[in-house]
Structure formats: C-alpha cells, structure tokens
Amino acid sequence: MRKTAFCIVALTSLIATSAIAADMAVKAPPPPIAPAATWTGCYVGVEGGGNWGQTHSIAAAGPNIGDAHSPSHDLSGGLAGGTVGCNYQIATNWLVGAEGDFSWTNQSGSAMTPPPFNTTVTITETERWFGTARGRIGYVANNWLVYATGGAAWTKLNLLEGNATFSESENRVLSGGTVGGGVEWRFAPQWSAKAEYLYVAYTPVQYFGIACCTLENRHLTDNIFRVGVDYAFATWPGK
C-alpha cells in the first residue's frame, strides 16, 4: 500500500513538473526584434552617365547689340565623377539630406555665326567639368528611396571661335540653379545604387566675341542623367 501511494505521489509530481515546464516554455518571452535599418548617415559614391543641353548667345555691345551672335543649338556628351552626402531619416518613411558632386564632362556643340556677323566663323562650346550642391527630401519604403533634389550648380565652359585664318578660345565659370529627382535602392547594409535626373539653368555670362569684336552674353541649360553606387561610411540611429 505504501509503495502504491509513493508511486502515485511521484507520478503526480512528475506530471506537475512537466506541466509547469511546458507552461514556462509557452510563456517564454520572444527573442528581441532587430531594429529596422535606417538611411541615416553619410556616404561617398561614384557616378557616370550623359548630359545634353542647349546654348545660344546675344551680342551685348556694338552696332548689332541684341542680335543673335550664335543661334540656339544642342550640346551633348558623357560624364563621370564622384559624390558625397549625408541623410537623416526624420520619420519612418521620410528623409532629408544634403549632397555635393563633381564630374568631368566632354559635352560640346557648335554652330556658325549668323548674319550680320562673320558667317565663316564657327563657335564651339565645350564643358570641362560641372558640380552641384543640393538638398534632398525623400520617401522611404523599406530598401527603396524616392527623392526630389535642388540647389546650386557650376560649370567651366570653353568657347572656341575661329575660321581658316584665325581662332581664339576663352574659358568662363558659369553658376546657376538645378532641380531634379531620383530613385535609390539599398542592396546591402552599407551599399546602394541610384539613378538621377537634373535640370540645370545657368546665369548668362559675358564672353568677348572675336567674330564680331564685341561682348556676347552666353546662355546655357543642361539636362543630366546619371547612375551611381554609394557606400555609407558613417551611420547613426535615425527615427
């Protein structure tokens, strides 16, 4: 009888222990959730693509002031350069940032001077480099960022004028404003790829038009399309 009672008590204790252990296993806290990745931080990158635009000039002095010294014509070329910037994710789905870039380019175009100027003269415009300093605001969806951007732009424009008997070149740095947008995809914790479009309008600048021995105001607008890869070298917690 005592053996039976002992066995009953032992079996009851074993069942109770198993039940408590099972209950503790069910009620054990879940593992901590890893924090969501953030776009907050600074980065450097490389980029390349193409650019195309339009230019023309107006005589700014002399007897033909106000006349077209060179007609409106197209420019086109390629570009390659680098970029640096910082982002801050201000909310779950929103981001603000600042970015600067510098690119070498061979964008160029040419046209003949029209009457009443020397119609044997060819004017060739070539951009040597350009850079921008811009702000960004974007919408974040997981590893994707869609953004708008705008700011200031600069370019070095070489003007070559000449014909069979003479030629002369002149360089000026033009400044202006730019707006655009792009999309960026983060394919690894510190790496992202992007595609971007910018429209640039430069403030007219004066060149000395040797073809008519007078000053000319050079107008220039650009369209820039480029792709790039960025590396986030510094990150910190964002919203």
Image: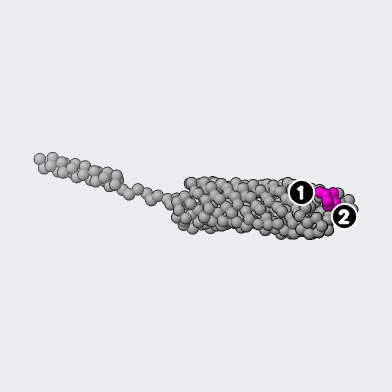
Residue 117 within the magenta-colored segment of the rendering: yes
Q: Is residue 18 left or right of residue 131?
A: left
Residue pointed to by mark 1:
71
**Which stretch appears magenta?**
114-119
Q: Quadrant of the C terminus?
A: bottom left
The label on residue 40 is none
On the question of residue 158 being in view, the answer is: no
In the image shown, does 80 or 170 lie closer to the viewer? Answer: 170
Tag 2 secondary structure: loop
Q: Is residue 40 left or right of residue 49?
A: left
Magenta: main secondary structure equals loop
In the image shown, does 92 or 4 lie closer to the viewer? Answer: 92
Residue 74: x %, y % from top left: 73, 46
On the question of residue 116 being in view, the answer is: yes
For the view shown, which residue lies furthest in the left direction?
1
Residue pointed to by mark 2:
166
Tag 1 secondary structure: strand
Residue 7: x %, y % from top left: 16, 41
For the point 62% across and 48% down, which residue is it?
197
Q: Is residue 104 left or right of residue 15?
A: right
For the point 31% across and 48% down, which residue is it?
28
For the view shown, which residue lies furthest in the front direction?
63
Q: Is residue 192 above or below residue 170?
A: above
For the point 52% across and 48% down, which residue is it?
145
